Image (spheres, rainbow, N blue to C red):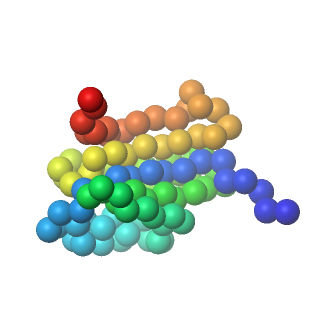
């Protein structure tokens, strides 16, 4: 039986004219394709899952290099074993 992944890095990117370039930068930093990707309503979210929080944390902090880009809407480090260890590094979602 496969063990459940304990942490994840989640990035939401707006699907604009520069989406492809931002996605390529993100993939270059991650050095791996995401485990999951979903497109909805002009936004694409990417999820990388990890067995250890430390590995997820390294990726999340590496992605901060490009998180200033307006296309990047959410950058989140999630810890499934300890929700208090989860941290949102960027969240530009418009709330209603």
**What residue is rendered at 45% in x and 64% in y?**
37
* Furthest residue toward left: 17
Question: Total marks drawn?
Answer: 0
Q: Position of residue 19 (x, y in %)?
A: 22, 66
Q: Is residue 63 visible to the viewer in this orientation of the structure?
A: no
Q: Position of residue 30 (x, y in %)?
A: 43, 65
Q: Say if 26 sits above or below 94 in the image.
A: below
Specify whether 2 is left or right of 52: right
Q: Say if 55 sits above or below 95 in the image.
A: below
* Furthest residue toward right: 1
**What residue is rendered at 26% in x and 58% in y?**
42
State which quarter of the image contains the C terminus: top left
Specify whether 47 is left or right of 64: right
Q: Is residue 42 visible to the viewer in this orientation of the structure?
A: yes
Q: Position of residue 47 (x, y in %)?
A: 48, 57
**What residue is rendered at 67% in x and 53% in y?**
5
């Amino acid at each position: 039986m496969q063990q459940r992944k304990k942490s994840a890095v989640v990035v939401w990117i707006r699907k604009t004219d520069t989406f492809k370039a931002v996605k390529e930068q993100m993939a270059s930093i991650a050095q791996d394709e995401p485990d999951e990707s979903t497109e909805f309503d002009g936004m694409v979210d990417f999820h990388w899952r990890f067995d250890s929080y430390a590995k997820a944390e390294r990726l999340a902090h590496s992605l901060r290099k490009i998180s200033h880009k307006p296309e990047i809407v959410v950058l989140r480090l999630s810890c499934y074993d300890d929700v208090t260890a989860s941290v949102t590094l960027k969240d530009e979602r418009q709330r209603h």
